[in-house]
Amino acid sequence: MTRVMQSETSILERYRKFLPLTEKTKIITLGEGFTPLVRARNLARALGREDLKIHLKLEGLNPTGSFKDRGMCMAITRAVEEGSRAVICASTGNTSASAAAFSAQAGLKCFVLLPAGNVAMGKLAQAILYGSTVIQINGNFDRALELVKEIGENYPVTIVNSINPYRLEGQKTGAFEIIESLGDAPDYLAIPVGNAGNITAYFRGFKLWHEEGKSTRIPKMCGFQAAGAAPMVLGRPVENPETIATAIRIGNPASWEFANSAIDESGGMIDAVTDEAILEAYKMVATLEGVFCEPASAASIAGLKKSIEAGRIAEDKTIACILTGNGLKDPKCALEACKQDLDPVEADLKSVIKAMGI
Ligand code: AN7
């Protein structure tokens, strides 16, 4: 499935009958969804498992560069329909970028609460440029979300974090697209977990289309958290989560219980991957497949690698890895992960040929 072949511009139009929309609903869209699902043969070979059909869902190609647009178009569409004038969210970065963009298009006021110093530069730049009011707090994401809930209860602003049920409704469309691309659901879904909304939404989407007879199976939902921010693996909230993957630097996920049910019901797993493993996977998927995802997204590849090494992935299976966000959002991480000598050389042929190492 390619983006240019779609006659619809919005996933809300395409999947209208599976979403809480009516004939009258005016859809707010930036052309989200319809992201490519690409086969990763080089990666499978490098992991020593050419039998596996590994696919990468390139969610970084959404309008604001992350999967959040799937849920945000739905949440903002409904906020407008319900007469809201302002929205608010807490965010590790991507939700704020998406909320700010859709609010701009819809003419809504948008407030975003960010953990100061822990949001990738590209995401902060997006939230500012789309015209939201950015409030950086001296606290982490979990604290920001507590504040947002309190504000939502006391002021006339609509919360557009994934505790807003329309967000997860829209995010189910990722599962629909995968089934359409593969002709069936995959055997496994590998997905990074932060606030645990996306794994919940994918499960609901797969379950719904299985019930509709559009697939023969529901994938084993395999969620991966960063080791320094792995409350679901530890079975208790993490007060001071730490990881290089700032998008998933979350210690007390809002959809924890839903995600646990998704994992249990599907026979999946939840596991933790270290920052080193995340960075290794981040480089692998870039150098082997030409895909630049953000560090949090690479947790899905790191998790798949760990699961393969532990012998947990059966032969000849089909796997979809959700690459949730675009690597360009966090160029600092890429430059720091790069071991190349970037010092300039003299602008003459001899120096350049020498630098080429040939
Ligand atoms: C790239 O933007 O929570 O488990 O505030 O940006 O559904 O939270 C981002 C989460 C994975 C985790 N990958 O998804 C936010 C935020 C990327 C992300 C996740 C996020 P959830």
Image (cartoon, grey):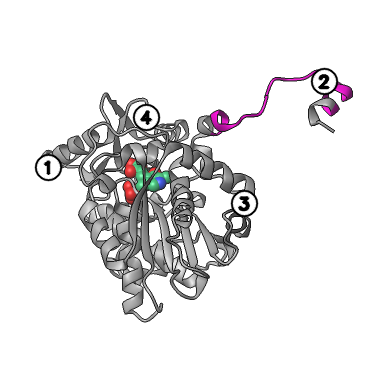
Q: Which residue is mark 3?
A: 289
Residue 95 in view of the camera: no
Nearer to us in this view, 155 or 217: 217
Gap between marks 1 and 4, in whole Å? 26 Å
Queried whether the magenta region covers residue 339, the answer comes back as: yes
Q: Which residue is mark 2?
A: 347
Residue 283, percent from left and from top? 57, 41
Q: Are marks 2 and 1 in contact (CB under 8 Å)?
A: no
Q: Are marks 4 and 2 in contact (CB under 8 Å)?
A: no
Q: Which residue is mark 4?
A: 118
Given the image, on which type of amino acid does mark 2 rest? Ala
Mark drawn on residue 153: 1
Given the image, on which type of amino acid does mark 4 rest? Asn
Q: Which residues are magenta?
A: 334-353
Residue drawn where x is 40% and y is 65% of the image: 175
Of the four image quadrants, the one with ligand 1 is top left
Residue drawn where x is 30% and y is 65% of the image: 204
Given the image, on which type of amino acid does mark 3 rest? Glu
When the figure is inspected, residue 84 is found, relative to residue 50, above or below; the finding is above
Which one is earlier in the sequence, the residue at label 2 or at label 3? 3
Which one is earlier in the sequence, the residue at label 1 or at label 4? 4
> Badge 1: few (under 14), some or many (20 or more) residues near its Cα, within 10 Å?
few
Left or right placement of residue 259 versus residue 227 in this view = left
Given the image, on which type of amino acid does mark 1 rest? Glu
Which one is earlier in the sequence, the residue at label 4 or at label 2? 4
Queried whether the magenta region covers residue 223, the answer comes back as: no
Label 4: which secondary element: loop
